[in-house]
Amino acid sequence: RKRISTFICCCFGPFQLLLYTMKLQLCNYSGLKIHPGHGKTMVRIDGKTYIFLNAKCAAAHLMKRNPREVPWTVLYRRKHKKGIEEESTKKRTRRAQKYQRAIVGASLTDIMAKRNMKPEVRKAQREQAIRAAKEKNKAAKATKKAAGPATKAKVTKAPMKATKNMAKAARTGTRR
């Protein structure tokens, strides 16, 4: 039979009923609810009272087992985040804000002018720079070709000295 946690008392006449709800208590070890008429109370010599759900909880407490390490206790389930149905909330990540700054050797106005330049103008500048580089290379080659044969001279390497094999000096001193 199922026990009901309501106490019925007949007060103020035979036809009036008052309903009292009995207080549910919590087990000192497991953290589970203890319904009226259940449980076991232990009073220590110093006067501290412990209410346990059943003999299993009382025995575990007397053996000094840590309820945070016993899987069926409420404390264990809280510690290891069991049975918590949390709404899936996305963590908001803060993105670094990008903004334009001046760089050494170029002011912000110069950078913005280059950035806002039209592609045709940029292409024309690139072609002009390539032409100038090619002309410079041609001029350098021409001067090198003209001065090339006159300045070349044969460089001979000096012969290396032969080394004599010397005998190694005998070891002296005491052994370690």
Image (spheres, rainbow, N blue to C red):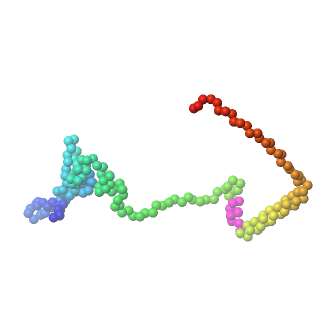
Quadrant of the image containing the N terminus: bottom left
Name the residue at the right extreme. Answer: 150
User: For this view, does 161 lie left or right of residue 150?
Assistant: left
Name the residue at the top extreme. Answer: 173
Residue toward you, 172 or 107: 172
User: For this view, does 87 lie left or right of residue 61?
Assistant: right
Residue pictured at 73% horizontal, 67% vertical = 122
Residue toward you, 16 or 166: 166
Residue 82 image point, x, y percent: 35, 59
Question: In which quadrant of the rendered view does residue 20 lie?
Answer: bottom left
What kind of secondary structure does the magenta stretch mostly adopt?
A: helix
User: For this view, does 20 lie left or right of residue 149?
Assistant: left
Residue toward you, 69 or 81: 69
Quadrant of the image containing the C terminus: top right
Residue pictured at 12% horizontal, 63% vertical = 16
Q: Is residue 113 magenta?
A: yes
Instruction: Work out whether residue 5 can be spotted.
Output: yes
Residue pictured at 36% horizontal, 58% vertical = 81
Residue toward you, 115 or 91: 91
Residue 153 image point, x, y percent: 88, 52
- Which segment did they paint magenta? 110-118
